[in-house]
Amino acid sequence: MKIAEIELFHLNIPLKETFWPTWIPGYPQTHNRFTLIRIRTDDGIEGYSAGTAMGIERQGLGDLLGGYLLGSDPSDIDRIQSLLKQAGILGWLNFWIEPACWDIIGKAKGKPVYELLGGAARPIEVYNSFGELHEPGPRIQELLALKEKGFKTFKLRAKAKEFKDDVRLIEEVRKGVGPDPIIGMDANQGWLVSIVDRIPAWDLKRATDFARACADNKIEWLEEPLDWHDYDGLAALKKVSPVKIAGGELNHGWDEIKIMFEKDCFHIYQPDATFAGGIQQVMKVIDACHKHNRIFSPHTWTSGIGFYIGWNLVLADKGNTHPLEYPNEPPSWIPEYREGIIEPIIPDKNAMLQPFTRPGLGFEIDKKLLKKYGTRFYHQTEKGLAFKVIREKGLKTALDLKKRKEG
Ligand SMILES: [Mg+2]
């Protein structure tokens, strides 16, 4: 099996209402944007994956990727991982592409990816992950409305300029919703983006004080309280924190996350395969969680396709009972726009997701919606690439290169 064709699409799905993500303070998000890759093998199997995007910044990426990936065996994940890493030396992080190869392997074997990874079908619970900073009054009502729909676990954001307002939020929300809902807090301090508002970064003291306030208000976990590379700070915080410390969502794969295990930074590891090294490297994190008695709970706030990738990994992690992040901030960030080109993912009235059994990563692309929201900006075949090489390097060199690559 080899990669015979690669296509890249910009996806641009307009939201009905503007979404204000706390991780880009002050930025009005009007679209769900991501890059979609479609890889086709020489036997016609199609694999898909998606990488979150701000705009069309990956416009030139195909020119780079084509030469690296065309002709390679998509089922040789070690080789794919190595090639994506090599392509990344020139600047882009390309791990979001690797799951498309798993999609192909699953489809070739007629099995869902989680089964290939040693998992089995089972219903899993999801938690409602809010993405905006709201005043306690409306937030209480929003949380209670979703509790009515079956959600038992929630995540709120602590992203106020002043410490006292972050504390006020959890105090008032806890008072307003009562003791039952399980709540986690995300400080979004791991990778600060300040293209609009400049919110001061937390230091170890603020993070420690907030962790204590979390305990006082029955908060289960505190996510990304410090910079993603402040391994020592995170380890110092974890040592004294009365609540679980979580993070690692966008760290660059196992090379970074293994340091976090060595330093003991977290109770909960949250690598998102579309950023943190692809499925293969996140499986290493799951293994390390078992070895060190830590919890795996992947970040999924990208697109519906990204959610499916995280879902496969949780299903692969047998015995994992931590609920999976379900990004949902009505009325702006909701399943219809989050998924965009695949069927909306909707949990049942107990916040449980029934397992999918389709082979591969499990989603099906709606080709009509892809046409509506997608713009293809790169298309290359193995043959097309061969002609390009002949044009640029001359026939003799092209033939010589082919021989060397195959031998
Ligand atoms: Mg987070």
Image (cartoon, rainbow, N blue to C red):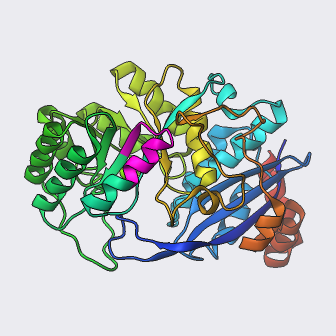
- Quadrant of the drawing holding the N terminus: top right
Q: Who's the residue at 67% across and 62% down the image?
A: 340
| Rendered position, 314 above or below 246 | above
Q: For this view, does 29 lie left or right of residue 197?
A: right
* Quarter-of-image position of residue 314: top right
Q: Nearer the viewer, residue 168 or 199?
A: 168
Q: Nearer the viewer, residue 235 or 348?
A: 348
Residue 251, can we see it?
no
| Rendered position, 86 above or below 216 | below
- Quadrant of the drawing holding the C terminus: top right
Range drawn in magenta:
142-154
Q: x%, y% of residue 264?
A: 25, 32
Residue with the most extreme bottom position: 196
Q: For this view, does 158 lie left or right of residue 93?
A: left
Q: For this view, does 281 lie left or right of residue 322?
A: right
| Rendered position, 386 above or below 150 | below
Q: Who's the residue at 40% across and 59% down the image?
A: 131
Q: For this view, does 272 lie left or right of residue 244?
A: right
- Residue 149 magenta-drawn? yes
Q: Nearer the viewer, residue 202 or 151?
A: 151
Q: x%, y% of residue 95?
A: 56, 52
Q: Nearer the viewer, residue 147 or 205?
A: 147
Residue 258, can we see it?
yes
- Residue 211 magenta-drawn? no
Q: Who's the residue at 68% across and 26% down the image?
A: 115
Q: x%, y% of residue 299?
A: 45, 46
* Quarter-of-image position of residue 64: bottom right
Q: x%, y% of residue 267?
A: 29, 32
